[in-house]
Amino acid sequence: MADTIAKVNDYKGKLPWWVAPITITVVLTAFGLYSFFIVLFGPTGEYGGYLLSPFYSPPVGAPDWLPVWLSPAAFILWIPLGFRATCYYYRKAYYRAFFWDPPACSSRAQQREPRSPENYRGERNLFVLNNIHRYFFYGSMVVVAFLWIETVRAFFPDGGFGITVGGLIFLVNVVLLSMYSLSCHSFRHLVGGRLDCYSCVTGGKARLRAYSQLSVLNRQHALWAWLSLFSVLFADIYVRLLMAGVFTDFRLV
Ligand code: FES
């Protein structure tokens, strides 16, 4: 794993500086539009009574006043979307990609920055909401807990235990989402980053151990961010293809 990451970083270093911001713009725009249409117009992504698309978990009922074109998933989706939008890594990524502020680290890229760095005054106006990232983390952990429940359900396709391709896709997805959430900078700070003296607090040793382990996960936070984004998308598309009858969920066991 470390070797692969080193190779990817090495390869990235050889690409022109504009490749990363343009790729991120395309991927985040596509993901945002996909989520938007799913919530507004898409039917609930559920197949066979045991595979519920991660976009709809936890399932909530639709109140009478809800317009028919709006999915009740809207009551939930703001949590994971807010969690990603306020994430420290994604903030760096979308400031670069959408605002070119700056577009990359190289001096050539910084010459393209529309605003002089001397005029930078921090995150203001709507962007002060980024400061509530920790609260989105709490909400997101609840959503991840429900996704684990849905994943267990996916291993009981007809009431009894069974392993299907869908169940495995859900398992990979929930593991990647858990890695993304647990490697969060805010969580690492809560567990131990804010302490100056571990031996001065109760359970200091355990917190230091947990902090060290989270720090290992945190080093690859960007990787977990992208892998989990793609896995959510993949799981939802897989469920929709099943619903459309393109293929059936192949049972392995
Ligand atoms: S910093 Fe990225 S999820 Fe918290």
Image (cartoon, grey):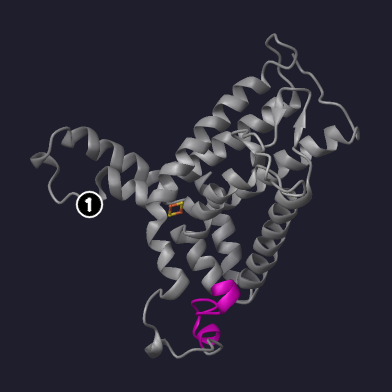
Residue type at mark 1: give it: Arg
- The residue at the point 26 percent across, 50 percent down is 193
Name which quarter of the figure residue 182 lies in. top left
Q: What element carries label 1?
A: loop
In front here: 59 or 85? 59
- The residue at the point 49 percent across, 52 percent down is 83
In front here: 222 or 124? 124
Name which quarter of the figure residue 239 lies in. top right
Give residue 163's position: percent from left, percent from top. Answer: 71, 18
- The residue at the point 12 percent across, 47 percent down is 197
Residue interval drawn in magenta: 96-110
Please tell me whether residue 104 belongs to the stretch shown in magenta. yes
48 sits to left or right of 199: right
Give residue 177's position: percent from left, percent from top. Answer: 54, 41
Rendered-image quadrant of the C terminus: top right
Q: Residue furthest top?
A: 160
**Residue carrying label 1:** 194
In front here: 240 or 6? 240
Circle 1 packing at 10 Å, graded few (<14), some (14-19), many (20+), is: few
Q: Quick check: 135 above or below 27?
A: above
Q: Quick check: 126 above or below 195?
A: below
Please tell me whether residue 51 belongs to the stretch shown in magenta. no
